[in-house]
Amino acid sequence: MRYFIELSYNGSAYHGWQNQPKDISVQEVVEKALSMLLKETISITGAGRTDTGVHASQMFAHFDTQAIFNKTNLVYKLNSYLPKDIAIHNILKVKDDAHARFDAVSRTYLYRITLKKNVFSFDNSFFVKQDLDIEKMNKAVGVLFMYKDFQCFSKSNTDVKTYYCNIMKATWTLKDNELHFVIQADRFLRNMVRAIVGTMINIGLGKINVEDLHTIIKSKNRSKAGFSVPAHGLYLTEVAYPNDIKINE
């Protein structure tokens, strides 16, 4: 049987989602917990590969097992066993060919910028001391919808077949003393969101003009885009799937 597991995690203590040869990852911790509780070796495949220090308020992964279990009890046991920075929310029975990564139709990320020094948010948002022109940053968002090839925002030497991404939503919103960037697309390149945010900050600081974003994207050159903002302000917030992927029980 194949199952989807829905979880969230604070990525501060982990070297990203994916298993690493020498460093601890979220995937490794969850696999060990599932293997122990189901009494068989369990491998899980995530909906994406968040980088070191990146968080997720919603992540999905799939796994296969022959074990018979009560889903509510397994969720409870997993949460009791796992560390405090990983939480399991649900386990769903899905079709045998359902794939957590390839069947996802969109992913949504949030980046949090703190505009005022806050002792309670410095470890989960990026503090920017300078004044930002939010109006210009929102104008720059409109430029993103004019393009599909975002190689300029991709980490160099990335092994991908295409740099094309379909951006469905991108907005800057001011909430109290925080500036939130929300972006939704069918797929994302490595470091893409952090590079976009860094470029937008440069626009907000007046270091580059909104019109310059056209030249940056067309260049397909990472060095032309802005800096990569710190990972601790980035959250994977939603992964969407077709409605028929779940098996009604």
Image: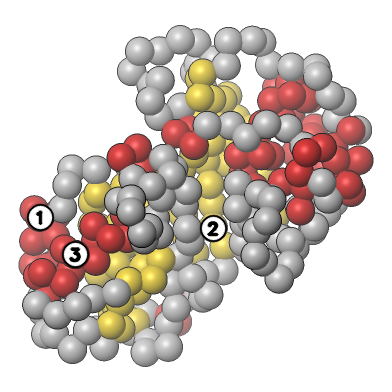
**Above or below, 140 relative to 218:** above
In terms of secondary structure, where does tag 3 sit?
Answer: helix
In terms of secondary structure, where does tag 2 sit?
Answer: strand
Q: Earlier in the sequence, mark 1 or mark 2?
A: 1
**Above or below, 155 relative to 91:** above
Residue 37 appears in view: yes
Residue holding disc 2: 107
Could you tell me which residue is drawn at 43 percent across and 44 percent down? 52
Whole-percent x and y of residue 80?
Answer: 8, 53
Residue 32 numbered tag? 3
Locate the N terminus by quadrant. bottom left
Residue holding disc 1: 81
Question: Which tag is nearer the camera, tag 1 or tag 2?
Answer: 1
Could you tell me which residue is drawn at 45 percent across and 10 percent down? 117
Identified by mark 2, the residue type is Arg
Question: Which tag is nearer the camera, tag 3 or tag 2?
Answer: 3
Locate the C terminus by quadrant. bottom left
Whole-percent x and y of residue 195?
Answer: 66, 39
Identified by mark 1, the residue type is Tyr
